[in-house]
Image (tube, rainbow, N blue to C red):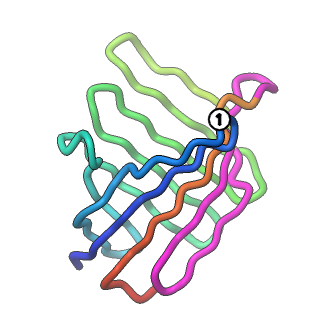
Amino acid sequence: MEISIQLVQEDLLSHRKTILADGKGNYSNRVLTYQEKDNPHIKHEISFCDDYVILKRHAEIKTETYLRLNKRGIAKILSPYGEMKMDTKLEEYNRDADSIMIRYSIYQGNEVVTNQTLIWKLKGLGI
């Protein structure tokens, strides 16, 4: 089903907010697909399950981030030079009729290298 989507990213380490997507997307079987606002050739595929979320970014360098609620997951970065893996943790996950919010961290060893909130504002969808 085609929907309208706006994705807002808040980097909790730098305290910056960015609109990453603003336009049309598709939602079917708990999977949301859309393109980046400033890079329309880059596709995102997000799977929303009950206690985990999978973020996939299809570009020259691909990423697959597996987020499990209050448990460790894994982020994979796939480039022409090889694969890099880091630990992840989904710290908060909320869904309602017109938005989905996640807050998560990515770790390199024991150090947090990413801590952010993503909020998808969706129109034309009733979850």
Horizontal and vertical percent for residue 116?
62, 46
* Residue occupying image coordinates x 43% and y 71%: 121
Q: Residue at x 41, y 89 (%)?
A: 126
Residue 120 is a magenta residue: no
> Residue at horizontal 23%, vertical 79%?
1
What is the secondary structure assignment of the residue under circle 1? loop
Q: Left or right: where does residue 43 sit relative to residue 100? A: left
Q: Quadrant of residue 92?
A: bottom right
Q: Is residue 35 left or right of residue 81?
A: left
Residue situated in front as seen by the camera: 95 or 53: 95
Viewed as shown, does residue 124 lie left or right of 126? left
x and y, in percent, of residue 106 in the image: 66, 36
Which residue is depicted at the point 52% across and 43% down? Answer: 65
Looking at the image, residue 80 lies above or below residue 26? above
Which residue position is annotated with label 1? Answer: 14
Of residues 83 and 119, which is closer to you in this image? 119
The region drawn magenta spans 89-111
Q: Amino acid at mark 1?
A: Ser
Q: Nearer the viewer, residue 99 or 108?
A: 99
Q: Closest to the observer: 82 or 118?
A: 118
Secondary structure that dominates the magenta span: strand
Q: Residue furthest left?
A: 41
Q: Is residue 28 above or below residue 86?
A: below
What is the x, y in percent for residue 47? 45, 62
Rendered view: 53 above or below 105: below
